[in-house]
Image (cartoon, helix red, strand yellow):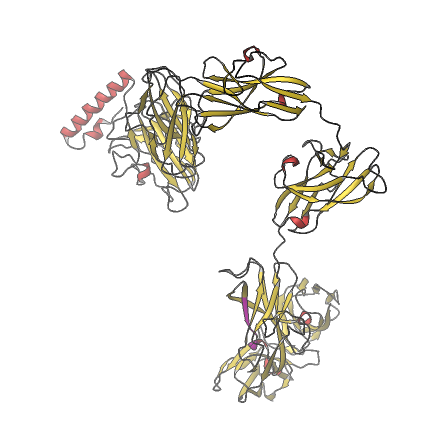
Amino acid sequence: MKKNLPSLLKGSLLIGLLHSVLFLALAFSTNTLKAQTIYEPEGLNMPGAWTTPVAWTNPPANKALASATQVTGGRVTKIATGTTRWQTIFSVAATGGDLVGGTYPWLFTSGPATNYYQNKWSGTKVIMNTLQNFTLQAANNDSITIVNNKWYTMNWEDKGYVNTRAIFMETSAQPVEFSTVSVPATVNPNTAATITVTTAAAKCPEEIIYLLYTKDSWTTSSILLVTMTGATGTVDIPGQVAGTIVSYYAFSSTVASLTANYDLCTIKKMNNGGLNYSYTVTGGAAPSITWANLQSPATGAITTGQSLNVLGQATIPGTTGQATAAPGLKEWVGYSTTNTNPNTWTNWVQGTYHAAAGTNDEFTADLGAAIAATGTYYYATRFQYNSEAFVYGGYNGGFWNGTTNINGVLTVTAPPVPDFGWVNLQYPDTGTIAPSQPFTVYAQDYIQGATGQVTPAAGVQSWIGYSTTNTNPDTWTNWVPATYNAPAGNNDEYKANIGAQIATPGTYYFASRFQKNTGNYYYGGYSATGGGFWNGTTNTSGTLHVVAPAPTITWADLMSPPSDTILVHADFQVYSQALIPGITGQSTPAAGLVGWIGYSTTDTDPATWTNWVPASYYSASGNNDIFNANIGPQIPTAGIYYYASRFKLNSGAYVYGGYSSSGGGFWNGTTNISGKLTINNPATSFPVLFTVIDATQHNSNIKFEGTMTNWAPVAMTNNSSTWTTTIDLAPGTYEWGAINDNGTPNGLWLIAGTSNLSMSVSATGVVSGTVSYTTLIDGIADNISAAVKIYPNPTAFSLNIEMPQQGSIRMFDIYGKQIIHQECGSGKQTLDLSSYSPGTYNLEIRSGNAVKHQSIIKK
């Protein structure tokens, strides 16, 4: 290690000299022994651009990156057991983690307080889960990319002040701690030892649990993968000779197929506090097979291709009869055409462990699948434990001896002539339905000389079966009887509706089944070329997708009130409900469900109404969602009105709700009807003076209009350039404006801007808002009809207007209410009319003092 001596002497002379001597000694040791570790008080730091704004702080303020020997609470700590290394584990998250995900430059450093950057290891771009080289005093920074919601374990190999190695291991959760590693009480010679490892919680997918063991005091070692289920795992250490001392420990890593560098690739370790775990293989006699048999059957009769499962058992005292098979115990079933000693046979089928049977282990093998030719065969079992000699089992209870414990006898004959020459799954091969909807499947069979006649072949039964697994239909349990449909060439065709039987969404597989009288079942599969006997490859099962129907509104009502009387502009809250099974009635409103309350002066079908007020979600009520809307202020004049509800789910059709005393439902005009609202004018009104001042003095016939006149023009009194009118108004809020009645359909609108004027009258007659307005709009206008082009007219969606120069566009409904007002430049302008109701509208185009009026028909 190199030091800057002048900087060290800036402090206490004595301390500086001692420090220098120590560093020179360390440097000498490093150069001579090549095994010196870094100076431990200076430790290992990981400064970098880890924060925003960037701040290369060393030692880092983040304790996950700071040396435990230089920063109180620093988490980069030295591990001296095994390969000397420094380790830190840190979390990454957008909030709440040690670091935030991103790509960062950084360094490994070690140095004194006078020069923390004195030694650096750099120039490497980190590849996760890979042991990489880091160069001492390289020119470039290191680089790493870390991801939010991940954890990282860093191990840095401490080889002193030379090039070294390090690894970053990435996991999707905090690495688990080990809880226990078991030690077997007794291990017999040549017998595998099962070791159980438990963790504090189930590991994350990236963590791999290993067990490292030695049988020669770590001169050599071997590594095993621990198979984990949840927080518990097991692994078998192979059997050893008597007297062998086996030592072992468990550790976790993210590196698969480890063969070296175990310590550097370790995240967590369980090694008995550094002593490791161990056991000694006992010196007693090795266990062996003391009894074996041919369990069952004693005899068998099959046709070629049929299965015959043969069972055999064996005893190893103290080893068999456990919850799992005895390690190292194998079994076979052999056969021969001669009734001789099985140790001379050559045909053996390896069996698989079946279950414990008392103190024995039982195995099974399918003998029938191995025999293709007809004839008489003799069979027995064979067992081997580890590398011991084979032993042979006979029927009726023990090692084969040819007298009391003998071979089984199997007769293999040709299969009988089939009842059917051919069967299939005719069609369809696929389908998609809702639960319990009809789905009819067709199948055909052929019997030479019997099918394809006027009547179905006698004695034939047919079924269509289904299953949630795409397996051989002979294992299925759900079969729907099929009925005869018609002859099809030389075949008979049957059909069955299996859809009605399936009420649960999912993917199902279907095939056909036929039987003649009490004979065997024959299964039919589908292929594009006609199908045939089911074989799972060329003739396969059909596939049916049962899909839950999209949610829909199954009920809606007009909840309350059924009727009422209010004054003009008064509040009137109307409530309604809708039901979407399984979706409404929750703690939050159903997604995509929208409601309205509509009103009309005629008691007709609400589907024909045009006045709809958006309703807001109110609350859940049982399985329903309640909506409400205040329609009172939306109705400007007294009269009798009828109201109902309207709902829509996503892009579905509208449904309409009506009222009844028994709970209501979809509007039908008889049992579920519209509500009735009577609106009266208030008994008290107050006179309000409205004034329009003509600043241009060119407007000769100014008239008043507004919501209080239903936008009908009202004459005003002229005094020089001041125009006035007094109107009696009930308490409420009103909009108004003024026109110069110049003979055009709607007159010349004198209010600048895009909004109407607004005023209010309180219940005590206090007037607020705008009741006086000065206009600067000149009533003298030239006609520009020839210069302006308007098309198409009529129109269903948009209206194009070609302007000779800049100006303004206004449009009025049939009541004279301004609905569009926009300023525009010269050239083509487009108005979107798609949201307006069909009817006639009046258009005014103004450019300078020129004006054009045009009636527009909206289709």
Q: Is residue 324 magenta?
A: no
* Residue 47 visible at all: yes
Residue reaching furthest right? 454
Task: Name above or below for residue 622 compared with residue 397.
Answer: below
Image location of residue 596, percent across then percent down: 59, 68
Q: Nearer the viewer, residue 628 or 31?
A: 628
Q: Nearer the viewer, residue 627 or 435?
A: 435
429 horizontally vs 134: left or right = right
Q: Is residue 632 magenta?
A: yes
Q: Nearer the viewer, residue 759 or 196?
A: 196
Query: Which residues fall within the magenta stretch?
Result: 626-633
Q: Which residue occupies 39% across, 47% down?
A: 95
* Residue 125 visible at all: no
User: Which quadrant, please, contains the N terminus?
Assistant: top left
Image location of residue 328, percent across then percent down: 45, 20
Residue reaching furthest left? 14
Rendered image quadrant of residue 223:
top left
764 horizontally vs 11: left or right = right
Q: Nearer the viewer, residue 403 or 240?
A: 403
Rendered image quadrant of residue 428:
top right
